[in-house]
Image (cartoon, helix red, strand yellow):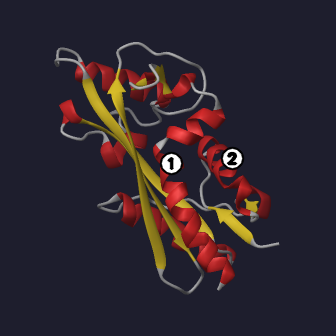
Amino acid sequence: MKKLLIATNNKGKVKELQDLLKDTGLELVTPAEINLDLEVEEDGATYAENAAKKARAFAHASGLISLADDSGLEVDALDGAPGLYSARYHPKPGANDADRRAYLLENLAGKPRPWTAHFHATIAIAVPEQEVQVVDGNCYGEIIPEERGTGGFGYDPIFLLSELNKTMAELEMDEKNRFSHRAKAVMNAIPVLKKIYSG
């Protein structure tokens, strides 16, 4: 079986990536399953730098081909913030997803709606001792002032997909995995993976 390490400790991301990659014929491995406890500081200037840094570190530590992603929410009324800092977008250390959503809405208060926004995802695939390959995906919508839905994670409850009139948190997993930024990035990553594993 050809193994692929999902290079993240974020349970929400692991679940999504496992679902998105389930038909690839690869054996998907998580860091927990191989007792790999690795935190990589995301200090790159771009999504691609962060994703590549994570993929490279996990590939080096495990000896396995590794897939990492870096993603963020970019809100037009906030000049693209929180962007790269989406997972750390709060002045208080130890803030959780709900704190970050509330802080985002605080910063949007008083700005004219619709608050157009998009989720961006960059996926990096690292083969030990080789070049890292990077692909992207985007999902467009708007931020709404009230939370809707109980699925997903992060900013999903306040990110509305206009064409479905549902937030990302109101989508079933299979629906989310047709429309999300991560789904689109994975679709672009699959041909790269096929090439790597057939080579």
Secondary structure under badge 2? helix
Q: Is 110 on the left-hand or right-hand side of 44? A: left
On the image, which quarter does residue 125 sit in?
bottom right
Residue 115 in percent (x, y) is at 26, 24
| Residue drawn at 61 percent across, 62 percent down | 38
| Number of marks in picture | 2
- Above or below for 132 versus 155: below
Residue 48 in percent (x, y) is at 38, 63
Residue placed farthest to the right in the image? Answer: 1
Q: Which residue is mark 1?
A: 182
How far is mark 2 from mark 1, CA to CA?
11 Å
Q: Which residue is mark 2?
A: 19
Q: Is 119 on the left-hand or right-hand side of 157? A: left
Q: Residues within 10 Å of mark 2 (few under 14, many from 20)?
A: some
Residue 51 in percent (x, y) is at 46, 62
- Above or below for 161 versus 10: above
Q: Is 162 on the left-hand or right-hand side of 40? A: left
| Residue drawn at 70 percent across, 61 percent down | 24
The reply to whether residue 64 is visible in this rendering is yes
Q: Quadrant of the C terminus?
A: bottom right
| Residue drawn at 45 percent across, 30 percent down | 155
- Above or below for 3 versus 76: below
Q: Give the amino acid type for the residue marked by disc 2 in the picture.
A: Asp
Q: Which mark is residue 13?
A: none
Q: Give the amino acid type for the residue marked by disc 1 in the picture.
A: Arg
The reply to whether residue 60 is visible in this rendering is no
Secondary structure under badge 1? helix
Marked residue nearer the N-terminal end (2 or 1): 2
Please state which of residues 175 and 71 is positioned toward the viewer in this rendering.
175
| Residue drawn at 56 percent across, 41 percent down | 178
Q: Residues within 10 Å of mark 1 (few under 14, many from 20)?
A: many
